Amino acid sequence: MSLGHIVLLSGRSIRLTELRMSSTYGGMLEGYPCKRINDLKVSWLQQQVERAFSSTPVHLVPPSREYPDETAGAFGPVEVLPSVACVGVFNSAALDPSMDGSTLVVAWFQPAPEVPAGEDAGLALRSIDWEELARDYEL
């Protein structure tokens, strides 16, 4: 059973079979979101995903960053990532017809805790170059 279905801009149909979500700034006790903190959060997410899915290709969709406050504090200007960090396992038809399917683990950030599906999936997610990033598998 898939949790969601997305048609990429390339026309390829992919299925979301596993989804993990967490608060981008959950556990942040002091300070404020800034470039340094956000770079660490993005890097940490990618490292965690690569460790958890070491036998599957992983792709990090670069997150959007907003600058709601022009004044700079001690750590520079406020910089905000979307509020939900996501990790999804996606599957699709095989790239090589002799294989059973293709898979890719994707990490991304989105504004709300919603399952990405159809046209509601963000443009960055729908822009994934599946043919370049995914890997075929046999059952």
Image (cartoon, rainbow, N blue to C red):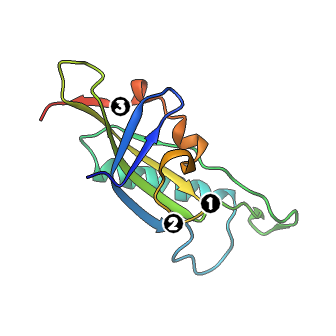
- The residue to which callout 3 is attached is 134
Residue 36 sits in which quadrant? Answer: bottom right
Q: Position of residue 135 (x, y in %)?
A: 29, 30
Of all residues, the one furthest to the right in this rendering is 71
- The residue to which callout 1 is attached is 82
Instruction: Say what amino acid the circle numbered 3 marks.
Output: Ala
Can you tell which of label 1 and label 2 is closer to the viewer? 2
- The residue to which callout 2 is attached is 113
Judge from the rendering whether residue 14 lies leftward or rightward of residue 76; answer left or right. Answer: left
Give the answer, above or below, for where 110 lies relative to 136: below
The earlier-in-sequence mark between 2 and 3 is: 2
Per the model, the C-alpha gap separating discs 1 and 3 is 25 Å
Towards the viewer: 130 or 55: 130
Instruction: Say what amino acid the circle numbered 2 marks.
Output: Pro
Considering the image in quadrants, where does the C terminus appear?
A: top left
Per the model, the C-alpha gap separating discs 2 and 3 is 25 Å
Q: Are marks 2 and 3 in contact (CB under 8 Å)?
A: no
Q: Describe the element under mark 3 as helix, strand or loop.
A: loop
Q: Residues within 10 Å of mark 1 (few under 14, many from 20)?
A: some
Tag count: 3
Q: Describe the element under mark 1 as helix, strand or loop.
A: loop
Q: Describe the element under mark 2 as helix, strand or loop.
A: loop
Of all residues, the one furthest to the bottom in this rendering is 29
Towards the viewer: 41 or 102: 102
Q: Position of residue 100 (x, y in %)?
A: 18, 29
Can you tell which of label 2 and label 3 is closer to the viewer? 2
Instruction: Say what amino acid the circle numbered 1 marks.
Output: Pro
Residue 74 sits in which quadrant? Answer: bottom right
